[in-house]
């Protein structure tokens, strides 16, 4: 009976479903399982389920990017998304994991490497709380998310081979090194920087890497006139884009609530459900705020702005979903919804072509999430004032964003100088599906929006 009560207090509903499906694990009468073993099993199951939810976000990114771009680039976008994940898994296995989690010897430092995952942490360790394998799956899904964000920002004009090279550098080096500064116990963690599930560590890194790519590549053909006037290139399938956002929203329940386990070391139903609540409130407020502002500015309600507003709210709350009140979640999401609309208009003004709004959603609102943690968060480090907390958040956020932007700007610039970055004008006009991959996503007579 004690064992059942203990489980009831700590497992999430998803874990209970797993226990029902796996009666050999869930039977309280089975005395072969000690309490540490039972807790280890439950925590591992929860971590695995959350990893799958985050992994499913790749499908959301793919549908969003496909829907917001021309039909002639569909195969290219889908191909980039599957390769982000596949290359990311391999490089994070051999390199990224060891860079991001180098061990206690590197606490407070800026760099360390403890060896590839493939030769580490292979034996179960009940004291760790859950299996290292499920932990890896959760973390590698985060790494793939950071890389995939860039795909939308460079859509329609980047050579496929160069994109693969970029994806490997980001997931194998850039993301893990800056991730170590916070989640691996590095320098920013020592300063007291808070980023619960990655507004800055994941989303801002991807957003600013995407901004660097968009700047170096230049806009798509026909996006701006010679006089600088903006000519929108509409996406070919808003239904796909909306489906992608809904998938991403669902996947975020692995992203944010799942991170609770990595901080506390044990499942906690109350904390997990509260994190899901603040996440939901912020996303909903972001969508409504973006819709209202766009409606006022453009005289018509714009569904794409509302979709990006929901994502903006999700990005903004990711850093602080564990420590803001419900009113704080409303503020975080509402401001994020306003920022994403203004960010899209800003890029248009300065003639930077970001087809899906990757920087406004993930870069700008990722920065907002880091700063909002200092403003609305309750977990102020002991001995630190509110002003000091805000200062740490601003400084740490700036360091990570500059790191991602500068490293990726250098990489994209080198590829451009070598003539490896952008496809030819002829190939761009015909579409990357044909020029890069030799196939259509749709039968040619049904292809839409050939622009």
Image (cartoon, rainbow, N blue to C red):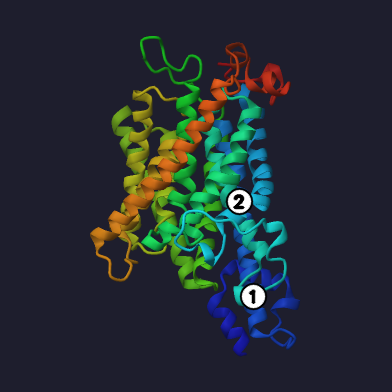
Residue behind mark 2? 96
Q: Nearer the viewer, residue 180 or 428?
A: 180
- Report helix, strand or loop for mark 1: helix
State left or right for residue 151 relative to residue 199. Answer: right
Which quarter shows the N terminus? bottom right
Q: Residue furthest top?
A: 226
Q: Is residue 239 visible?
A: no
Residue 61 in percent (x, y) is at 57, 40
- Residue at figure coordinates x 47%, y 44% from the top left: 205
State left or right for residue 43 relative to residue 304. Answer: right
Residue behind mark 1? 40
Q: Quadrant of residue 36?
A: bottom right
- Report helix, strand or loop for mark 2: helix
Q: Nearer the viewer, residue 360 or 385?
A: 385
Residue 446 in percent (x, y) is at 67, 20
Residue 434 in percent (x, y) is at 69, 19
- Residue at figure coordinates x 33%, y 34% from the top left: 342
- Residue at figure coordinates x 64%, y 75% from the top left: 40
Q: Taking 133 as reference, is 251 above or below it?
A: above
Q: Nearer the viewer, residue 74 or 179?
A: 179
Q: Nearer the viewer, residue 73 or 37?
A: 37
- Residue at figure coordinates x 49%, y 37% from the top left: 407
Which quarter shows the C terminus? top right
Q: Residues within 10 Å of mark 1 (few under 14, many from 20)?
A: many
Q: Residues within 10 Å of mark 2 (few under 14, many from 20)?
A: many
Q: Is residue 10 visible?
A: yes
Residue 6 in percent (x, y) is at 57, 83
State left or right for residue 369 relative to residue 383. Answer: right
Q: Taking 448 as reference, is 333 above or below it?
A: below
Separation of residues labelled 1 and 2 (CA atoms): 25 Å
């Amino acid at each position: 009976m004690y064992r059942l009560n203990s489980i009831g207090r700590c497992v999430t509903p998803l874990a209970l479903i797993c226990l029902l499906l796996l009666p050999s694990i869930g039977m309280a009468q089975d005395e072969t399982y000690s309490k540490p073993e039972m807790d280890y099993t439950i925590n591992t199951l929860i971590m695995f389920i959350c990893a799958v939810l985050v992994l499913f976000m790749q499908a959301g990114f793919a549908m969003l990017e496909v829907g917001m771009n021309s039909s002639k680039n569909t195969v290219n976008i889908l191909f980039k998304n599957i390769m982000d994940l596949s290359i990311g898994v391999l490089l994070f296995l051999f390199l990224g994991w060891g860079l991001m989690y180098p061990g206690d010897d590197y606490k407070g430092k800026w760099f360390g490497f403890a060896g590839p995952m493939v030769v580490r942490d292979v034996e179960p360790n009940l004291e760790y709380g859950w299996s290292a394998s499920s932990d890896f799956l959760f973390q590698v899904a985060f790494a793939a998310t950071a890389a995939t964000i860039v795909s939308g920002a460079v859509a329609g004009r980047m050579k496929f081979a160069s994109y693969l090279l970029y994806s490997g550098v980001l997931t194998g080096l850039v993301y893990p090194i800056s991730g170590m500064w916070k989640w691996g116990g590095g320098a920013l963690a020592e300063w007291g920087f808070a980023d619960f599930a990655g507004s800055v560590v994941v989303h801002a890194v991807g957003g600013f890497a995407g901004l660097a790519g968009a700047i170096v590549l230049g806009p798509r053909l026909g996006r701006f006139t010679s006089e600088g006037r903006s000519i929108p290139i509409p996406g070919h399938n808003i239904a796909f884009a909306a489906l992608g956002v809904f998938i991403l929203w669902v996947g975020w329940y692995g992203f944010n609530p799942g991170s609770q386990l990595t901080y506390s070391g044990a499942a906690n139903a109350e904390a997990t459900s509260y994190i899901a609540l603040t996440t939901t409130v912020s996303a909903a407020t972001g969508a409504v705020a973006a819709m209202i502002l766009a409606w006022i500015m453009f005289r018509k309600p714009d569904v794409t702005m509302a979709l990006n507003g929901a994502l903006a709210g999700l990005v903004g709350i990711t850093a602080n979903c564990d420590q803001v009140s419900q009113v704080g979640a409303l503020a975080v999401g509402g401001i994020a919804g306003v920022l994403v609309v203004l960010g899209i208009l800003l890029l248009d003004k300065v003639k930077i072509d970001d087809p899906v709004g990757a920087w406004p959603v993930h870069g700008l609102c990722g920065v907002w999430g880091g700063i909002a943690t200092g403003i609305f968060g309750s977990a102020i480090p002991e001995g630190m004032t509110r002003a000091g907390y805000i200062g740490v958040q601003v400084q740490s956020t700036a360091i990570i964003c500059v790191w991602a932007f500068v490293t990726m700007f250098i990489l994209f610039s080198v590829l451009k100088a070598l003539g490896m970055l952008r496809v030819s004008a002829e190939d761009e006009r015909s579409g990357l599906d044909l020029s890069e991959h030799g196939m259509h996503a749709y039968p040619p007579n049904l292809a839409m929006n050939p622009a």
